[in-house]
Image: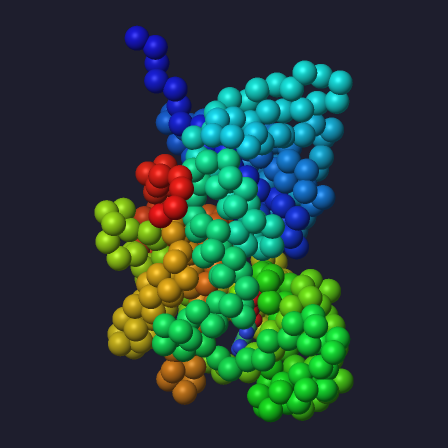
């Protein structure tokens, strides 16, 4: 009898967003623990320009070495995706007949940020009829956009901080009104691109009424996204929870919470503090039992409010006022072995290889099409 074919997993990483390198590091970690007795990995890198290339599965090439971050580089070949139900991939090389890579059983879109975590690749995969891990089109898009995310959570009675959204049109045509609205928020602000991650483009502004500082912060955020959000700073502790779609159709599973300790010398959890510093986690977070219970409940509710699937990390502020605020939901959280998401699950009894396996299995079980 012919040996059963291994399950073919396309791991897609890199991408066009500013989180390209972080996605590469995540892919390196995930690829290193995929059980090669059961799965065959197709490592697919997306260059910064958006080209798809078949890359090496040598996970060491995808690690942070000596403070240098990995990237996907083009190699002259291109991957082509057929828009039919074959879920087959082709390699196109200059002056050569396209080579068939065969059928893909499941795709792991390990992409962060726009053109990856925001519903775009999910839409592409839906069009191809491919199975893929993680949130679908709407949940990805809604979670990526901090303004829509807050509106959905508010609709579910889940507390987030006060904010003002600034669209491109408002910034060009209604700047005075926008600045007045922002000044009215009062106090310290965080000004962010509406759809980014890894803290890129975020500034802390000491005084909402300091118009010059607010304008500079908005312009800095607009380098990354024409849509911006200005939020009131919450004074408190940063807490996160991992969420996984239930394996048996029940309510989502929520990990123990982690507390983030931002390394000394940083004003907030910015890019350098996140990836290139001594910032650390305490798992489980040392909080009153009622707060832990409430945070875990809200993590599950947030996951369901946006219609998330597969996995997510929900980030909170445990305010000095004792209130719990959702900061954001990440539908493809950082996923290296040392990232918060796997660490929280390890502390909850699901180690890194099992976590990766569970996410692949959840994706394989989901039928393509409307759910
Ligand atoms: N409203 C806020 N109050 C206090 N700190 C904030 C606020 N918003 C953001 N921060 C700080 O900035 C960091 C990055 O903000 P976040 O909204 O999580 O952006 P990203 O999607 O890039 O991770 C947070 O982890 C936190 O340290
Ligand atoms: Mg964040």
**Left or right: 69 as drawn, with respect to 257:** right
**Left or right: 282 as drawn, with respect to 266:** left
Observer-nearest residue: 355 or 116?
116
Residue drawn at (56%, 49%), measured in percent from left and top? 120
Q: Position of residue 301 (x, y in %)?
A: 33, 66
Residue drawn at (60%, 54%), measured in percent from left and top? 114
Q: Quadrant of the N terminus?
A: top left
Q: How is the image coloured?
A: rainbow
Q: Position of residue 51 (x, y in %)?
A: 68, 38
Total labels drawn = 0
Residue drawn at (63%, 85%), measured in percent from left and top? 182
Observer-nearest residue: 334 or 118?
118
Q: List the single residue furthest toward the top.
A: 1
Residue drawn at (60%, 67%), measured in percent from left and top? 194
Q: Position of residue 152 (x, y in %)?
A: 44, 69
**Left or right: 336 as drawn, with respect to 6:** right
Q: Position of residue 84 (x, y in %)?
A: 51, 30
Q: Is any part of residue 182 visible from this angle?
A: yes
Q: Quadrant of residue 40?
A: top left
On screen, residue 246 above or below 330: above
**Left or right: 248 as drawn, with respect to 314:** left
On screen, residue 337 above or below 172: above
Q: Is any part of residue 202 visible from this angle?
A: no
Q: Quadrant of residue 195?
A: bottom right
Q: Quadrant of residue 153?
A: bottom left
């Amino acid at each position: 009898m012919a040996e059963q074919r291994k399950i073919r997993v396309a791991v897609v990483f890199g991408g066009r967003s500013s989180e390209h390198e972080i996605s590469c590091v995540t892919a390196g970690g995930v690829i290193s623990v995929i059980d090669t007795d059961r799965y065959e990995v197709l490592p697919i890198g997306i260059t910064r320009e958006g080209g798809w290339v078949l890359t090496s599965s040598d996970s060491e090439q995808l690690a942070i070495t000596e403070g240098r971050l990995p990237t996907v580089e083009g190699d002259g070949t291109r991957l082509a995706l057929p828009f039919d139900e074959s879920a087959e991939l082709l390699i196109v090389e200059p002056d050569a007949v396209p080579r068939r890579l065969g059928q893909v059983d499941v795709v792991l879109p390990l992409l962060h940020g726009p053109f990856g975590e925001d519903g775009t690749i999910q839409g592409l995969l839906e069009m191809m009829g491919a199975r893929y891990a993680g949130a679908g089109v709407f949940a990805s898009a809604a979670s990526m956009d901090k303004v829509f995310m807050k509106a959905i959570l508010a609709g579910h009675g889940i507390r987030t901080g006060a904010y003002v959204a600034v669209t491109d049109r408002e910034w060009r045509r209604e700047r005075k009104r926008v600045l007045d609205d922002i000044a009215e928020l009062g106090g310290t602000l965080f000004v962010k691109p509406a759809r980014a991650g890894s803290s890129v483009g975020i500034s802390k502004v000491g005084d909402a009424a300091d118009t010059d500082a607010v304008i500079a912060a908005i312009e800095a955020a607009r380098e990354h996204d024409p849509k911006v959000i200005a939020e009131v700073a919450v004074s408190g502790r940063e807490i996160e929870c991992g969420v996984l779609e239930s394996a048996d159709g029940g309510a989502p599973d929520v990990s123990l919470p982690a507390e983030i300790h931002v390394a000394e010398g940083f004003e907030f959890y910015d890019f350098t503090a996140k990836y290139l510093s001594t910032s650390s986690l305490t798992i489980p977070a040392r909080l009153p039992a009622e707060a832990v219970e409430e945070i875990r409940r809200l993590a599950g509710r947030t996951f369901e409010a946006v219609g998330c699937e597969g996995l997510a990390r929900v980030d909170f502020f445990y305010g000095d006022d004792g209130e719990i605020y959702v900061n954001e939901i990440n539908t493809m959280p950082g996923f290296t072995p040392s990232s918060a998401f796997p660490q929280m699950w390890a502390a909850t009894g699901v180690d890194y290889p099992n976590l990766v396996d569970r996410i692949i299995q959840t994706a394989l079980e989901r039928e393509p099409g409307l759910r």
